Image (cartoon, rainbow, N blue to C red):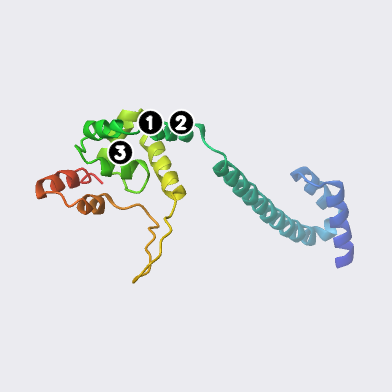
Amino acid sequence: MNPTQVEHIFRSFLDDHPDPSSEDWRALLQRYPEYTEDIVHRAISHGSRLESERRQIGARTLTFAQNLLQSQPSPVLEAVDAQLTAVKGPQVRDIARQIGLGEHVNLLNGVLVGRTQAPVRVLSALETYFDAPAMVLRAVFEQRFAASVVPAFKATREQPQVTVEPTSWVDAVHSLELSTEETTRLLQMAEDD
């Protein structure tokens, strides 16, 4: 066996057949039966290297496509975001009543801007009210939270706190310091979660 000769045969073959078929490989082996074992080993090595390169190219292409997709605004998300943005003033109070929050507009405002995680019952009611899928509503709430402005302030005694995730429904309800009955009623909305 002459490794230089085998390398030359193999390289010439790949130059002539950049994407060789099974028939091309068979013809090469029939033409050089004395180098069959060496050619097969090189072909396996070449195939795995080529497959690895293809996987890397595929992964890079997929990553690029995902990044491009995420950077493009979704018409569906934009439409629902526009609907939510249009909710102002007395309409917020009406929606709060219709979806079972009563007079607790602060809870609804927190949900609509993405600062408060909506429990399934509230999300379902909003889904019906806005005629938008719950998944789309959640995505819009997440985008709104991510895009929310962090207030600038000077800390006097302690370090400022910046929330990195929305407040839970339970914490939001407890922060209102309502009567026990009203707190229980609102917390029951999260029991399905």
Q: Is residue 91 left or right of residue 42?
A: left
Circle 1/circle 3 CB separation < 8 Å: no
Of residues 136 and 8, which is closer to you in this image? 136
Q: Is residue 12 left or right of residue 92?
A: right
Q: CA distance from mark 2 to mark 3?
A: 17 Å
Q: Earlier in the sequence, mark 2 or mark 3?
A: 2
Q: Nearer the viewer, mark 1 or mark 2?
A: 2
Query: Which residue, given by chain and number where applicable, does mark 3 sit on?
Result: 123
Q: CA distance from mark 1 to mark 2?
A: 10 Å
**Image quadrant of residue 42?**
bottom right
**Image quadrant of residue 102?**
top left
Residue 48 % position (x, y): 68, 57
User: What is the number of the mark on residue 57?
Assistant: none
Q: Amino acid at mark 1?
A: Ala
Residue 91 % position (x, y): 30, 30
Q: Nearer the viewer, mark 2 or mark 3?
A: 2
Query: Which residue, given by chain and number where applicable, does mark 2 sit on?
Result: 79
Query: Which residue, given by chain and number where applicable, does mark 1 sit on?
Result: 132
Residue density around tag 2, few if under 14, some if 14–19, many if 20 or more, within 10 Å: few
Residue 171 % position (x, y): 25, 54
Q: Is residue 24 left or right of residue 54?
A: right
Residue pictured at 43% horizontal, 44% vertical: 144
